[in-house]
Amino acid sequence: MESNEAGSMLRDAGLRVTAPRLAALEALGDHSHATVDEVYERVATGLPGTSLQAMYVVLAALTGAGLVRRIEPAGSAARYELRIGDNHHHVVCSLCGAVEDVDCVVGEAPCLMPSHTSGYLVQTAEVTFWGLCPACRALETGDDAVASVPAAAPHDQPVRS
Ligand SMILES: [Zn+2]
Ligand SMILES: [Zn+2]
Ligand SMILES: [Zn+2]
């Protein structure tokens, strides 16, 4: 992301344009689903005056202004991303914690409607798909080729020649 693009995002959201905010937006543009630590690592060299604590404050402000979405898969530190407003979901690796986007099954919130809502007006459903990422699948089976095998490939068929 260009600085001027990040700057107009901030201005459009009514936030003052500051170097740490610009740097955080640019870092998230390069690396989605980053933790605060990861954002800090990316901005620290260009912004020697910043701190991890400052990045917590910056990301909270960006999240509060709706520029950044915060997700927190169970057992993981909070992660931040710029992809907002499309009700997309996530698939998380239960071994290494890798996170990828998956499009919303129906494309809008709430993606799922419970059969009984106890009188609540349901507005969103946050769906997390759990599984093994390609790298962990390859480790688990000791087979590098598994990463390119479709998930539905039959593994139980005897091989005949
Ligand atoms: Zn994994
Ligand atoms: Zn995402
Ligand atoms: Zn959905």
Image: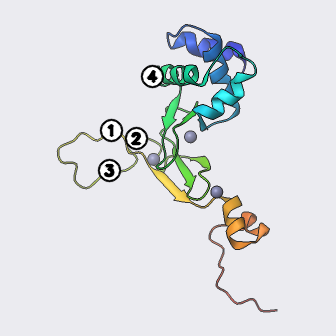
**16 over 126 or under it: above or below:** above
Task: Identify the secondary structure beneath mark 1.
Answer: loop
Residue for badge 1: 123
Q: Can residue 103 be seen from the camera position used here?
A: yes
**Amino acid type of the residue tagged 2 in the rendering:** Ala
Quadrant of ligand 2 in image: top right
Give the side of residue 47 with respect to residue 13, left or right.
right
Distance of label 3 from label 4 (alpha carbons)? 27 Å
- Identify the residue at image location x=56%, y=33%: 80
Q: Which callout, 4 or 1, points at the residue further toward the start of the chain?
A: 4
Q: Is mark 1 within 8 Å of ligand 3?
A: no
Classify mark 1: residues with Cα within 10 Å, few (<14), some (14-19) or many (20+). few
Distance of label 2 from label 3 (alpha carbons)? 9 Å
Q: Is mark 3 within 8 Å of ligand 3?
A: no
**118 over 121 or under it: above or below:** below
Query: Between residues 114 and 17, which one lies in front from this camera angle?
Result: 17
**Amino acid type of the residue tagged 3 in the rendering:** Met
Mark in front: 3 vs 4: 4
